[in-house]
Amino acid sequence: MKFRTSLKTCAFALATVAMLAGSAVQSQAQTPPKKYKIYLSMSYSGNGYQTETSNLIKALAATPPYDKLVDLKTVISGTDVQAQAAAYQSMVSAGADAIITFPISSTGLNRAIHEACEKHVLVYTYSATVTEPCARTVSYITAGFAPNTAQWLVNKLNGKGNVFIDRGVAGNSVDKMNYDGAMSVFRKYPGIKIVAEYYGMWNSQTTQQETAKALAAHPDVDAIFGENGEDGIVAAMLASGQKKLVPVTGENTNGFRLALANADLRKRGLDGISSGDPINVSGYAFKLMMEELTGKRKVAVHNIEYPLPWVPADKVKVCTGDTFVNGCNAFPSTKVPDSFNTEVFDPVLTPELSLNSALHGTPTPGATIQPLPANVVRQAPDVPGVNCQHCQAPADLFKLTKVSATVHP
C-alpha cells in the first residue's frame, strides 16, 4: 500500500510539474515585447518645419511593429539652452531609453547629453547637430546647401549686386553652417554687397515681416539668400507692390516651389533654387536610432550626412496625387499650406511615410516598418564647433557640388 501510494504521489507531482512548466511556457509566449521609453525633445515649435519633423517621428512610432515597441513622449522646451538641458536631465531621470532631438545649441547641451550617455541613454539629433561625441547627429548641413545656392545667386547676378541674407535661429548649428557656407562664396566677390541681414526664425510669417522691413530700407535689392520659411520672402516682395521681382534661393516650402513654377512671376523676374533641409531627416534619424536601440544595427559614426535635395525653378513640377511620382515635387495650394515643407518622401529610407504622416502624424494604413539598407550610413565631414570638439574641418568643406562658378572673383 505504501508503495502504491508513493507511485500515485510521484505521478501527481510529475503532472503538477508538467502543468506548471506548460503554464510558464504559455505565459512566456504571451509576454509582450519590451517597450522602449523614447523622448522627442524639440527646442522650439510654431513653424511648419518643426511640426512636420515631429509628425514624421510620431507616424513612424505608431507604425507596426514600432507601435508595440515604442512609448513616445514629446517635450518642447523653447529656445533657451538651459531649459532644453534640464529637459534632457528630466528624461533620463524618468527612465528614458533614448532621446531624439532638435538641439538648440551645438555646444551648450553637451554636458547634459554626456550625462545621458553615461546612463546608457541613446541620443540622436536630427538636422541640427551637437559636438558631444557620444551622440549621433543626422543632418544635411554638410551636404552643400549654402555654398551651392550662394554661387548660383552670384552667377545669376554676374558677380555684382545688393543681397539680403535671411537667417534662421541665432546660435543654432544649422544657421551657422548656412551662413558660413554662403559667406565663403559672397566674400570672394567684391561686387556683391550684403545690404541686410535678419533672422526669419525659419518661420514663414516672421520671414515675411523681416523681409518687408529690409525691402522698405533697400528697395534696390538684386537677390535674396533665404533659409527655411522662404515662401515668406516671396510674399513680402509681392506685398511690397514692386513690379520687378528678384532671384531667391531657399529651402523646400511648397509655396516657394509653386511661386518658382508660376509663369507670371517668372516673367517679373522671380527665379531660384529650392534646396536645403529635407524634412525626412527626422524620420531617417528615428529609424536609425530604433535599429541601434533594438540591436539590429551597430552605429559607430558620430556624424551622419543626409543627401541634399536640389530643385531649380525649371524643374518644379506640381503633383496630381499625394506622392512624388513621375518627377513631381510640389503640391497644389489646395492640398497643403504654403509653409508646408515638401521633402517628406524617400522610397528607400522611409517608404512607410505618407503626406498624411507629415500633416497629421498618423501612420500610413497597411504600412509596416522596413529595414534600412545595410550600407545606408554616410559619414559627414567634421566641422569644429558644429559637430565635433577637437577636430579639423576639411579644406574643401564648402566645395561646389551642384553648380560651377561661371563668374570668377
Image: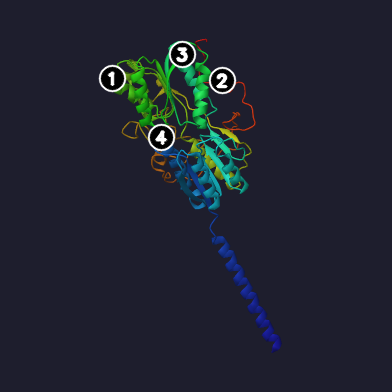
What's under tag 1, amino acid-wise? Gly
Q: Which residue is mark 4?
A: 323
Q: Quadrant of residue 24?
A: bottom right
Tell me the CA gap for discs 3 and 2. 19 Å
**Visible in this render: residue 305?**
yes
| In-front residue for pair 284/350 | 284
Query: Residue 241: which disc?
Result: 1
Residue that lies at the very extreme toward the bottom in this rendered image: 1
Badges 4 and 1: C-beta atoms under 8 Å apart? no
**Label 2 vs label 1: CA separation?**
38 Å
Distance between the alpha carbons at the discs numbered 4 and 1: 35 Å
Residue depicted at x 62% and y 21%:
395
Q: Quadrant of residue 2?
A: bottom right
Residue 288 in sight in this render: no
Q: Residue 56, position in %: x, y?
A: 45, 41
Foreground tag (4 vs 1):
1
The Cα atoms of the two marked residues, 1 and 3, are separated by 25 Å
Q: Which residue is mark 3?
A: 192
Residue at the spot of label 2: 399
Query: Which of the marked residues, 2 or 1, is nearer the chain's N terminus?
Result: 1
Q: Say which of 109 and 202 sits in front.
A: 109
Q: Secondary structure at mark 1?
A: loop
Q: How would you rate the neighbour count of disc 2 (Cα within 10 Å): few for under 14, some for 14-19, many for 20 or more?
A: some
Q: What amino acid is labelled 2 in the image?
A: Lys
Relative to 162, is 283 above or below?
A: below
- First in sequence, mark 4 or 1: give its number: 1
Label 2 – label 4 distance at C-alpha: 32 Å
**Which of marks 2 and 3 precedes in the sequence?**
3
